[in-house]
Image (spheres, rainbow, N blue to C red):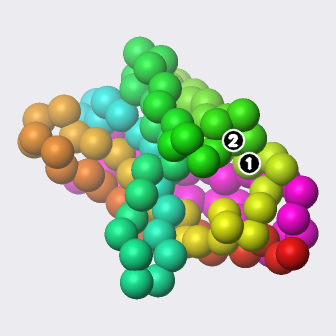
Amino acid sequence: QVQLVESGGGLVQAGGSLRLSCAASGSTYLINVMGWYRQVSGNQRELVASMSRGGTINYADSVKDRFTISRDNAKNTVYLQMNSLKPEDTAVYYCGARRIDISNYFHWGQGTQVTVSS
């Protein structure tokens, strides 16, 4: 099994910055892509940014040029630096890790609230 523990998040004013961290433990050799997803109550969970073990990165269009994902494979940790935050970035942010042995199977962290005030 894989466990994901998130840290960071909180309340920030518009234009501010936050940094999220997610540390994976357990059978981490089963993971390729790690990333951040967010969900607003009543809506579907959406991709924010993801990064493969080899360094391939994907960003949602809404966060390009503001958010930066990075990864330390030795520490099995992925980070999300969020700059120029907007009220519409308010959501619960989840760390997700996609398995390499089961098609489209994700492990999830517990989620961390990010609130951006105007």
- Tell me which residue sits at (66%, 63%) in the image: 89
Whether residue 27 sits left or right of residue 55 in the image: it is left
Residue type (three-letter) at the residue carrying disc 2 = Phe
Query: Horizontal and vertical percent for residue 112?
Result: 59, 70
Residue type (three-letter) at the residue carrying disc 1 = Met
Closer to the camera in the image, 70 or 2: 70
Q: Mark 1 to mark 2: distance in Å?
A: 4 Å
- Whether residue 65 is visible to the viewer of this picture, yes or no, is yes
Query: Horizontal and vertical percent for residue 40?
Result: 50, 76
Q: Is residue 56 above or below residue 7?
A: above
Disc marking residue 67: 2
Closer to the camera in the image, 53 or 83: 83
Q: Which residue is mark 1?
A: 82
- Tell me which residue sits at (10%, 42%) in the image: 102
Other-residue count near label 1 (Cα within 10 Å), few / some / many at <14 / 14–19 / ≥20? many
State yes or no: discs 1 and 2 in contact (Cβ < 8 Å). yes
The magenta segment: 1-28
The image quarter in which residue 67 lies: top right
- Tell me which residue sits at (52%, 49%) in the image: 48
